[in-house]
Amino acid sequence: MSLDPKNLLSRLIACPSVTPDEAGALDLLATELEAVGFAVTRLRFDGDGSYPVDNLFATRGQGGRRLLFAGHTDVVPPGDVATWTTDPFTPREADGRVFGRGAADMKSGIAAFVAACAAIPADAGTIQLAITNDEEADAINGTEKLVRWMAEKGHGFDFAIVGEPSSAETLGDSIKIGRRGSFSGKVTVTGSQGHVAYPHKANNPLPVLAAIATALSSRPLDGGNAHFPASNLELTSIDVGNPVSNVIPASGTLRFNIRYNDGWTPQTLAARIEERIASVDARGTMVAFDISGRPSRAFLSPLSADIETLGDAIEAVTGRRPKHSTAGGTSDARFIAAYGPVVEFGLVGTTMHKADESIALSDLEGLTAIYRTFIERYFAGANS
């Protein structure tokens, strides 16, 4: 059965699925997937300090090697709609492009892999889809719990592709074989408030805070490795909340974020941060370090025949061999990596999260062809 990816993408864009409201997007996918033979399970997870989230798991085929496609239907808010040419949730086609919130990130990836799966015979092999509506915000009750549920129910996989917009400049120029982790922290230094004319009656926390800022950021954490660039710590704010110039403040805070490679874990990073803070003379102040939110782990999928097969499929459609990359931020692939090998491969994402977000129709067609070619070769190799 054929399924037009452009038509499916347009219908998905028309669902205003701003996190965590799925707004009919998962209902739409369930209907389409059931029509091509998938067994669909809807799952709602909640708790752990976050909002309830609807998720979808679909599977078709039995036995042999198992292939997983994953993605998210949720989108970021459109922002000021006056900056859009037309309504963000009314799909528009112009100049060979489709416009609308989620066109790039990442309803196009879902439309492409669903259409590709629909074109594959049902007896080709075991295909699974894991789709959440909570990637753009908390990411607590989405993919992490969905893949845990899959493992508990025996829905393992041998290889996974997340359809994020991972191409850099042109379709198929890169495959994300890993991602850096993200670690955010806050340091608070507390002294005692006083008049600037009588510093001996106060304890100014700011010199200590400045020294800690220097200790944290002046030396590199590492030099990178074969697959990852050097980890980087960036100071993101230093706040005192002092509106006047004649008062020594009682306390100050600094915040930072680290994008780190697979040479670190959140635990070893926290230990290194504490070590650098401890190297600074606190001058009688109180210094507190807190980890902000939940750090995301770095991951690297081992190079394999499956990654080479994906490269072959990309080259067959585009005429170019993709590079292996770990650049960029983080994604839900970090949760999937705990259960098996995973890569990210999708469209060019230069317009994601912007007004007039869009993708080229030719790229959507090309991505669908790449996914279909890969699926065919993946299962042909398993059966040869």
Image: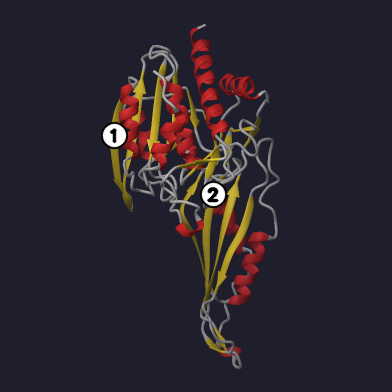
Q: Left of 267 or right of it: where is 211?
A: right
- Is there any visible trace of residue 215 in the rendered image? yes
Furthest residue toward top: 384
Residue 363: quarter of image? top right
Closer to the camera, 73 or 53?
73
Labelled disc at residue 42? 1
Decide which of tag 2 and tag 1 comes sooner along the chain. 1
Closer to the camera, 155 or 109?
109
Element carrying mark 2: strand
Residue lying at 64% horizontally and 52% vertically, measured from the top left: 232
Amino acid bearing label 1: Arg
Q: Left of 153 or right of it: where is 173?
A: right
Q: Is residue 340 above or below residue 291?
A: above
Residue 244 screen position, x and y as percent: 55, 86
Number of disc labels: 2
Residue lying at 54% horizontally and 34% vertically, measured from the top left: 361
- Provide the residue designation for mark 2: 182
Residue lying at 56% horizontally and 90% vertically, measured from the top left: 201
Image quadrant in which the N terminus is located: top left
Colouring: secondary structure
Q: Is residue 377 above or below residue 215?
A: above
Residue lying at 34% horizontally and 28% vertically, measured from the top left: 32
- Is there any visible trace of residue 344 in the rendered image? no
